[in-house]
Amino acid sequence: MSAGGRIGYDAPYMPRGCDMRWFSTEEICEILSRFEKVIIVGDSMMRHVIGSINVLIRKDLGYGAVTDWNFSQEERKDCFCNYQFNVKACSVQGIFKTADVIKNDPSSLACPINTIDVMIEQMIRYPMEPIELERFRGLLPATKPSRPYAFIYGHGLWNDLDLQATLDWLDLVLDTTISVAPWLQPGHVSSGTTSTFIQNPSQEVQGSMKRDNDFWPRLIMTPNAAGKEKPDEWLVTQGNKALMIFEESVKVEAEKRGIEHLGTWNMSIQANKFDGVHMDLKGNLVKAMMVMNWLNLIDVNSF
């Protein structure tokens, strides 16, 4: 999916070398229900990913990404359709977790109630605020759940595409995850409610615990291409050359950490950008569907 592109400006995106499906809402609900929780971690671009997932599971192109249940008439006018992704006025009122939809507007959710749990924890720059890490810790169970967790990360622009800052950010998120949820760590064996970490497991033990220690679905998404409205002062450090180099570098570093990578530069270079930085509704729906394709490929039976 990272290598796909468009033939002409704002033409439909086409993947390259893979079969990317466009799932129905019912199929999306089923895919999400395979997971105990899907946690998105990152900045406003990632906020737009969960917003687009909410558009799909609420079947609402007009207001599916935002908390329209508490909108005034003026907000409903200002935040309709594409304007849901206006970062200054509307997307800050986005739906950050499906639990809020269930609480405030359950009839708008196409998925069966209490079968899915998707949320975002906004952690936008490095160093991180302690309160952000504390909130993140609160999302993680100390013991192995009945269904797997999936993690989707996104970072870069708030640290000016500084690769080392992004890696420090990512490593801190990973270390924090393991500190709370040791059942995700290689060499960890779960038995009922107890947990054990084996320093140098034998081959026999390694085989018996493979289902426990090899299942930590993680994806990192790198920022989309810049548009013509990108402010000039950012064109050197955050322009398309810098974005391409950053995407390639993150892919290499993610692989070292056992994390899959989804690049969005090719998908977005000929797409419309809402403000020169963020994509519009169409572009963000493509991103969301890319994520759904990744989630669909995860063999949850291995958990």
Image (tube, grey):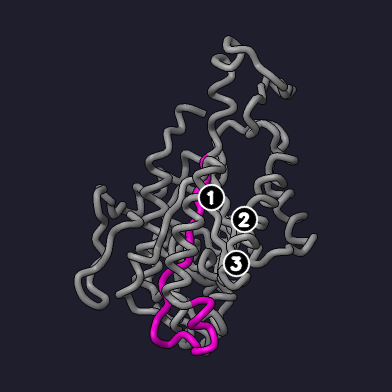
Q: Secondary structure at mark 1?
A: helix
Q: Residue at x 55, y 48 (%)?
A: 151
Image coordinates for residue 161, horizontal then vertical, percent: 56, 69
Q: Is residue 230 magenta?
A: yes
Which circle marks residue 192 in the picture? none
| Nearest the eye: 7 or 146 | 7
Hey, what amino acid is under mark 3? Answer: Asp
Q: Can residue 170 be spotted in the picture?
A: yes
CA neighbours of label 2 inside 10 A, class few (<14), some (14 to 19), many (20+)? some
Image coordinates for residue 181, horizontal then vertical, percent: 69, 37
| Nearest the eye: 73 or 201 | 201
CA neighbours of label 1 inside 10 A, class few (<14), some (14 to 19), many (20+)? some
Q: Is residue 94 magenta?
A: no
Q: Secondary structure at mark 2?
A: helix
- Sequence order check: which comes first, mark 1 or mark 3? 3
Q: Look at the numbered discs 1 and 2 and tell me whether their residues touch, using CB distance below 8 Å.
A: yes
Which circle marks residue 162 in the picture? 3
Q: Look at the numbered discs 3 and 2 and tell me whether their residues touch, using CB distance below 8 Å.
A: no
Give the spatial CA distance, label 1 vs label 2. 8 Å
Please tell me in which quadrant of the rendered image residue 192 appears.
top right
Which circle marks residue 253 in the picture? 1
Find the magenta span and give its range: 217-238
Q: Residue at x 62, y 29 (%)?
A: 186
